[in-house]
């Protein structure tokens, strides 16, 4: 490239929006500006760069329409990528009619761009190898049984996902394009059975026809047609019958996703002994046991929401590469294995029929980030005193709800500094709630409800928390069915991220704190069935996202403020049971000011309970 052209290109990069300098780059052959932050419309001076062979402006912020004249003079162009921008308007593909050398068109993920293919015949002379129009608005003629594809004979990469295509997958597509490498027709409305050609397509690496309405069975000749396939995604369709044993012969396959179909029968005995890295069989009706001969190379195994039974294989311990294991929502029984792969990050064994003790080995998994063993029949107090002090430092989710566990909350759990989700709900835990909960600075959800906790609440909770459920325990002291008394602390208003607050069915007294108006994200607020008194703070009108609100069955009095927005949608049930309240939507009228205020002297400044969602489930 000459010095003058280098200077012009640098000048262009410095002010891409105007891009008048492009006229000086008439000998430029490749323009690669993808993955930047360029904005504005596509430079019209691109039309003057007649030597261009390769244009990549993908993953930027270009907007506006694509002029149908922009590329007509670029007769040498072979590859065009405008994907992942904000282009819009109508764009007919016949704009490329004069570009006989064009082999690749990529316009994907311009979600407001309407690509018109009804003039497809005008570009049939193009020897397209790559056509990617994902998330474009194809014209109505194209989305109905996309027969326009039958005229292609050289396609290697085809992506028409997210386009509402209907009808059957044209059999001519694979019959004519024998060198196809990548096919993505996912997230459409395609129907009918899956028909495969009778010949081999050895070049095919990946197929995705997920999220459609395809039916029938998985073709038994799939391993013969695609002997070198590496990734297969048939998920979220209506496929039936059993998984063909011929999949075992696909020795190059590393990712298999057959999830969310209606597949039945057992998992083929040798299916998982192949070289798979990821297997998704969840959301089917598979039965029987999990094979013992699972490949040591597997990293992800998801078979949740099936009818698998028996005991969890001890051989799982040998899967040294396994990082994600989900066996939830099955019929597994017996005790938990005494060994798990040390590499595991996510482990979900919930909603089975597992019994026995929780082995301490679970808490020796140093890489573990999420553990869900909820809704089983696990018992004992292995969660008290026997959990090693070296609880996984990366643990962010611990869910053991609805078991028969008991004991107190071990301090070791409270040392997991990255914990964001902790649910001990529906067990027999007892003792006091530790003060050290306050140290879990990342905690978003804490559910200790339906246990036997007693004593007073901690003096503080993590400021990050957005859901706290302590209902149905035996908690006492100042401040649903607990025995909380006293006033609602104004410090609750500091929880700006709180989305739900339920203090109903307690014995709370005093006024409604005006500080509740600071809960800017609150969606549900229930302080009904207490002994609250005074007026309703008019400042509550600032809660713009409130969908559920109840202050019924208290001792409130005065006028109901003239609320707007969300509050205007709440009816009588919100306020009833307060004999001193007047005004719409209750019966009676008000003549006093609607701006009822609450004196700060009346608010209890000693209590510092934060982020309470103490739902009583009444």
Image (tube, rainbow, N blue to C red):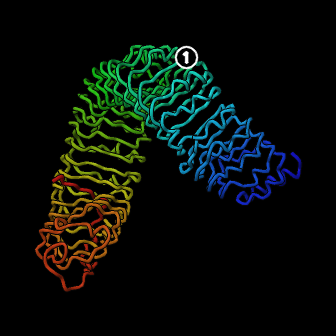
Image quarter where the N terminus lies is: top right
Residue closer to the observer: 431 or 573: 573
Which residue shows up at 15% across the image and 65% down it?
A: 530
Look at mark 1 in the image and give the residue it sits on: 227
**Residue shown at 66% from the left, 31% from the top:** 129
Question: Which of the pair 92/109 is nearer the observer?
Answer: 92
Is any part of residue 326 visible from this angle?
Answer: no
Question: What quarter of the picture does the C terminus occupy?
Answer: bottom left
Q: Give the percent coordinates (x, y) of residue 33.
A: 70, 47
503 in relation to 430, above or below: below
Q: Quadrant of residue 328?
A: top left
Q: In the rendered image of this protein, does residue 203 appear above or below residue 5?
A: above
The one of 158 and 261 positioned closer to us in this rendering: 158
Residue 347 at x, y = what percent?
A: 38, 33
Choose top left, top right, bottom left or bottom right for residue 361: top left
Relative side of 113 to 451, left or right: right
Q: Is residue 4 visible?
A: yes
Please give left or right for residue 44 compared with residue 166 in the image: right
Residue 282 percent location from the top left of the image: 37, 29
Q: Quadrant of residue 273?
A: top left
In the rendered image, residue 506, in percent from the top left (x then y), is placed at: 16, 61
- Name the secondary structure under disc 1: loop
Q: Residues within 10 Å of mark 1 (few under 14, many from 20)?
A: many
Residue placed most toward the observer, 494 or 519 = 519
């Amino acid at each position: 490239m000459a010095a003058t052209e280098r200077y012009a290109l640098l000048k262009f990069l410095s002010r891409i929006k105007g891009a008048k300098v492009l006229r000086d780059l008439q000998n430029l052959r490749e323009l690669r500006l993808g993955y930047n932050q360029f904005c504005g419309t596509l430079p019209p001076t691109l039309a003057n760069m007649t030597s261009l062979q390769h244009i990549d402006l993908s993953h930027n912020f270009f907007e506006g329409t694509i002029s149908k004249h922009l590329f007509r003079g670029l007769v040498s162009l072979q590859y065009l990528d405008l994907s992942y921008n904000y282009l819009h308007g109508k764009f007919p593909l016949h704009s490329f009619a004069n570009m006989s050398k064009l082999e690749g068109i990529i316009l994907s993920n311009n979600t407001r761009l309407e690509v018109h293919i009804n003039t497809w015949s005008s570009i049939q002379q193009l020897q397209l190898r790559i056509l990617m129009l994902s998330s474009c608005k194809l014209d109505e003629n194209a989305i109905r049984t996309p027969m326009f594809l039958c005229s292609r004979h050289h396609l290697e990469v085809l992506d028409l996902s997210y386009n509402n295509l209907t009808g059957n997958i044209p059999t001519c597509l694979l019959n004519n394009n024998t060198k196809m490498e990548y096919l993505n027709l996912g997230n459409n409305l395609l129907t009918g059975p899956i028909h495969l050609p009778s010949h081999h397509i050895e070049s095919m690496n990946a197929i995705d026809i997920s999220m459609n309405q395809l039916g029938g069975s998985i073709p038994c000749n799939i391993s013969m047609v695609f002997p070198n396939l590496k990734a297969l995604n048939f998920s979220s369709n209506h496929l039936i019958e059993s998984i063909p044993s011929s999949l075992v012969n696909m020795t190059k396959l590393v990712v298999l996703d057959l999830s969310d179909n209606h597949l039945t029968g057992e998992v083929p005995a040798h299916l998982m002994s192949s070289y798979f890295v990821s297997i998704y069989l969840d959301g089917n009706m598979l039965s029987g046991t999990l094979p013992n001969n699972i490949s040591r190379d597997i990293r992800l195994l998801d078979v949740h929401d099936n009818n698998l039974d028996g005991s969890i294989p001890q051989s799982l311990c040998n899967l040294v590469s396994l990082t994600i294991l989900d066996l939830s929502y099955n019929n597994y029984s017996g005790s938990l294995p005494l060994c798990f792969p040390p590499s595991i990050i996510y482990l979900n064994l919930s909603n089975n029929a597992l019994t026995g003790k929780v082995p301490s080995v679970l808490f020796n998994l140093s890489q573990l980030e999420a553990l869900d063993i909820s809704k089983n029949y696990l018992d004992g107090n292995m969660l008290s005193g026997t959990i090693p002090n070296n609880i996984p430092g990366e643990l962010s989710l611990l869910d053991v709800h609805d078991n028969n566990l008991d004991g107190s909350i071990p301090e070791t759990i409270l040392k997991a500094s990255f914990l964001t989700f902790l649910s001990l709900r529906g067990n027999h835990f007892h003792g006091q709630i530790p003060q050290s909960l306050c140290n879990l600075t990342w905690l978003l959800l804490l559910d200790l409800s339906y246990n036997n906790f007693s004593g007073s609440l901690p003096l503080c909770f993590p400021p990050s928390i957005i859901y706290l459920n302590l209902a149905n325990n035996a908690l006492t002291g100042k401040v649903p069915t607990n025995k909380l008394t006293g006033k609602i602390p104004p410090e609750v208003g500091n929880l700006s991220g709180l989305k739900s607050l339920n203090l109903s069915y307690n014995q709370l007294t005093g006024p409604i704190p005006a500080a509740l108006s600071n809960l800017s994200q609150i969606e549900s607020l229930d302080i009904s069935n207490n002994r609250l008194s005074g007026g309703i703070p008019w400042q509550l009108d600032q809660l713009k996202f409130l969908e559920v609100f109840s202050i019924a069955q208290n001792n409130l009095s005065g006028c109901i403020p003239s609320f707007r927005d969300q509050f205007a949608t709440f009816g009588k049930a919100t306020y009833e049971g307060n004999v001193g309240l007047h005004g719409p939507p209750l019966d009676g009228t008000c003549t006093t000011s609607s701006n009822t205020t609450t004196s700060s002297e009346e608010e209890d400044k000693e209590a510092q309970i934060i982020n309470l969602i103490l739902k009583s489930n009444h």
